[in-house]
Image (cartoon, rainbow, N blue to C red):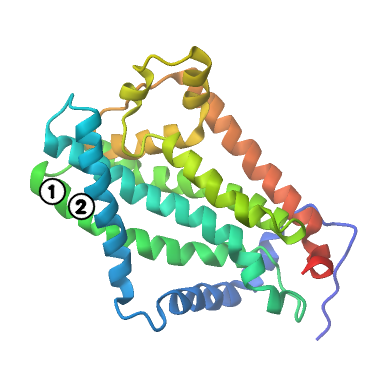
Amino acid sequence: MKTVINSDDNSILSISELRRYSGLLRYLSLRDVFVRYKQTWAGFGWSVIRPVVNICIFGCLRYLVDRSGGFWDSFLMVSAGIVFWQLLSTTITDVSNSLLANSNILTKVYFPKILLPLSSILVCLIDFMIAFIIFLLLFFGFKGLPGWQILWLPLVIAYGLIFCFSLGLLSATASVRYRDVKFILPFLIQILFYASPVFLSSEFVLGLNIPVFVKVLYQVNPLVFIMNSFRFCFFGEFESFNLVYTAISVGITALLFFGSMRYFLKFERSFADYI
């Protein structure tokens, strides 16, 4: 069987080709899951320990910094932020590392290289679901069932994954040529953590005595809209919603997605020259 690659068409993602390699995508996804938890004594327990520790630390810190609400209300808000942030941050990190971590197979056989970043999402979703169940138990125990807005949850999660996949794909492509990217990315994620309403609410941040341009930069950050949307699905209140900033953040996400895909497809066939 002969595979012909047309080098003239390197800017379009072939959906039909991805379908032909769907079995490989499943294999790579499951392999990532097994590799993540292989020879770990706690296994999936690490997916519980990490968010629980972060929830306790930042829950107490939130209450010390902002006492506008009750302790348990603040604790639940922080729990929602930490659990969802774990999905977003691990998606960025795992997608970014997907090409270099699989450099041994990039040059041996042909397959759509986009499968490597895509396959890394499954293990992130599994980690998220384990921690998410803990959050649901806490929420049901203190708040009961959420309102109708919970129907938006799948769309919010999908939108968050699109943004983080795009950022991770851009980083993954750049890291093949520029290895400094893997050192810059953790620093960038740390900045995004504090620049997003993970444990401090948008209302609290926007109420601080800080320059106006800082507040504008904060509100156009797509992660602000994503995090607030996730909390809205459970608590029914959308903090500091602004239609203009929402449109800008959605536009940034769209540009990032199409730009990262085009960048990836442009340099896909030259990966072997830099690995």
Tell me the quarter of the picture where residue 146 sits: top left
Q: Position of residue 96 (x, y in %)?
A: 60, 58
Q: Position of residue 91 (x, y in %)?
A: 49, 56
Q: Residue at x 46, y 57 (%)?
A: 90
Q: Residues within 10 Å of mark 1 (few under 14, many from 20)?
A: few
- Which quadrant is the C terminus positioned in? bottom right
Could you tell me the amino acid type at mark 2? Leu
Q: Position of residue 178 (x, y in %)?
A: 74, 56
Tell me the quarter of the picture where residue 199 sits: top left
154 lies above or below 272: above
Q: Nearer the viewer, residue 193 or 264?
A: 193
What's the distance in space between the residues labelled 1 and 2, CA to CA?
A: 6 Å
Q: Residue at x 65, y 37 (%)?
A: 255
Could you tell me the amino acid type at mark 1? Phe
Q: Residues within 10 Å of mark 2 (few under 14, many from 20)?
A: some
**Tag count:** 2
Q: Is residue 115 visible?
A: no
135 lies above or below 125: above
Q: Is residue 213 left or right of residue 33?
A: right
24 lies above or below 252: below
Give the labeled residue for mark 1.
Answer: 140
Q: Is residue 186 left or right of residue 193?
A: right
Furthest-bottom residue in view?
1
Q: Is residue 67 visible?
A: yes
- Whether tag 1 and tag 2 are in contact, CB under 8 A, the answer is yes
Give the labeled residue for mark 2.
Answer: 136
Q: Residue at x 65, y 52 (%)?
A: 171
Q: Nearer the viewer, residue 15 or 178?
A: 178
Q: Nearer the viewer, residue 98 or 28?
A: 98
Q: Is residue 152 left or right of residue 168?
A: left
162 lies above or below 249: below
Q: Secondary structure at mark 1?
A: helix
